[in-house]
Amino acid sequence: MYTGRASRNLRSRLERHLRAEKALRWHIDYLLKWAKVQEVRIFSGRAAEECGINLETARSNGYAFLVPGFGSSDCACPAHLLWTGNNGHDGPRAAEEDMSPQESRD
């Protein structure tokens, strides 16, 4: 699961992400070369709420942060890409193990 935001042009951004043919520009573009979008959920609110939604989704569902730093270069979240499981396989680690924001991204 990926948590992201769009401050403007939400519809065109989603349409772009869902297209198969596109220039690879953002990290999500590279991920979507190999992953299939199964569902899109839209939450209205302020951009500052993105991290709270991401962290609460991970915590309340036991999802894991799959790739440290993925999608979170502009915030202190561990990542914005969450492992939700796959056919009964557990993720690499439970989300509860590290819910604290990272101090730096060096």
Image: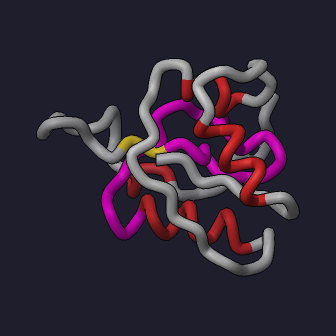
User: Is residue 93 left or right of 15 when viewed as pictured?
Assistant: left
- Quarter in which the C terminus is drawn: top right
- Depicted 97 relative to depicted 32: above or below: below
Q: In the rendering, at what x and y percent does residue 97 appear?
A: 40, 50
Q: Residue at horizontal 39%, vertical 57%?
A: 96
- Depicted 34 relative to depicted 13: above or below: above
**Res 19 → quadrant:** top right
**Res 31 → quadrant:** top right
Q: Which residues are magenta?
A: 59-81
Q: Residue at horizontal 50%, vertical 57%?
A: 40
- Depicted 23 relative to depicted 51: above or below: above
Q: In the rendering, at what x and y percent does residue 23 appear?
A: 78, 19
- Of 79 and 101, nearer the camera is 79
Q: Is residue 71 magenta?
A: yes
Q: Residue at horizontal 79%, vertical 71%?
A: 48
- Depicted 84 relative to depicted 53: above or below: above
- For this orientation, the residue located farthest to the right is 8
- For this orientation, the residue located farthest to the left is 88
Q: In the rendering, at what x and y percent does residue 67 appear?
A: 53, 31
Q: Residue at horizontal 79%, vertical 69%?
A: 47
Q: Give the number of callouts.
A: 0
- Of 76 and 89, nearer the camera is 89
Which secondary structure dominates the residues rendered in magenta?
A: loop
Q: Is residue 83 magenta?
A: no
